[in-house]
Image: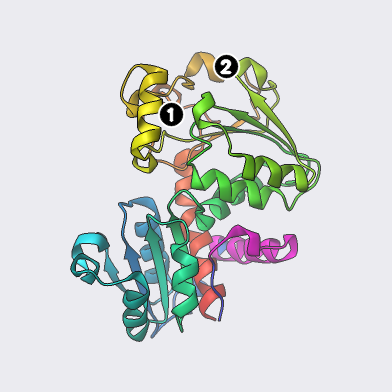
Amino acid sequence: MYNLVSCEQYTRERLEKLYELTDQIAANPAAYADKLKGKIIATLFFEPSTRTRFSFESAALRLGAGVISTENGNAGSSTAKGETLEDTIRVVMGYCDAIIIRHSEDDSSERAAAVSSVPIINAGAGSGEHPTQALLDLYTIRAKRGSLDGLKVAVMGDLRHGRTIHSLLKLLSLYDGLTVYGLSRELFQLTPKYVKFLKDKGIKYIVCKDFSDIPKDVDVLYHTRTQAERFDKSFSERVWDAVHGAPQSSEQFVVNKKILSKFSEQTMLLHPLPRNEEIDTNVDNDPRALFFEQAHNGIPVRMAVLLTAIS
């Protein structure tokens, strides 16, 4: 049985094998239409989701599996009656062949995997990780650039709470010669835990204070929204004091046409979505803006993840 709870589970060889399967699925999806026929996938979401839930359910259906789902687990499941996460998993695992879970607690996937007899796939856990988002993010970069060695990647926005960034950094660490640039407000900087992780992996990490600190030939600009739903009261008050406004309006690093024009024609602009004001809609038609293509790559990547987990 294969659980996917963290990107730290991947080796470079294992990741490339997954991407080879993804390439095959993308090239000939009809060949995989019945690969999970007779299987049932449970999507157990305790937090809002559009792309992740829909793409996982679409991936399951395209593989011939059935889907059972809750999109508001905190209110629409027995959690509302006080049931523990562990007991919910113990019940749901009897109804399906794999569970895809999104939850507000960082350790939720590990806790689910500890009691489950069917594969658990982490679809976003608090401020911790979002492995399959990182898988499709890196797949998008790979599809455009080919080699993943020697990348220069700028991660921007809420680096403190951004689980997509945390997972992406772990996957990037499997490759050689990388430089990562971090652009954010001081309160939202990458935590020491992840700075140390990069250092231990031999990745150069450079803290930036402005777009001008990022080289023009950077390969990837990866932006994220402010994760206001992750703020506790104390942090919210610190944000308020720092920006003199609500946490939702704390973004100062906005990518617009003028900013994007400063970078190479080969630079990719990515975002896990949803976006707020951090990427102006006036860049949407720029060929470097790949965030909608990035979202659609979730289908073949998550088909590959499901096949790997269940086969």
**Residue drawn where x is 36% and y is 81% of the image:** 90
x, y percent for residue 72: 24, 59
Quarter of the rendering containing residue 21: bottom right
Q: Nearer the viewer, residue 140 or 102?
A: 102
Asked whether residue 277 appears in the rendered view, the answer is no
Q: CA distance from mark 2 to mark 1?
A: 13 Å
**Residue drawn where x is 39% and y is 65% of the image:** 101
Q: Is residue 12 magenta?
A: yes
x, y percent for residue 291: 48, 39
Q: Main secondary structure of the magenta part?
A: helix
x, y percent for residue 59: 42, 65
Marks 2/1 in contact by CB < 8 Å: the verdict is no
- Quadrant of the snapshot with the C terminus: bottom right
Query: Which residue type does callout 1 highlight?
Result: Asp
Q: Is residue 177 left or right of residue 108?
A: right
**Residue drawn where x is 42% and y is 24% of the image:** 251
Asked whether residue 57 appears in the rendered view, the answer is yes
Q: Which residues are magenta?
A: 5-26
**SS class, disc 2:** loop
Q: Which residue is mark 2?
A: 261
Query: Which residue type does callout 2 highlight?
Result: Ser
Q: Which residue is mark 1?
A: 284
Mark 2 packing: few (<14 Cα in 10 Å), some, or many (20+)? few
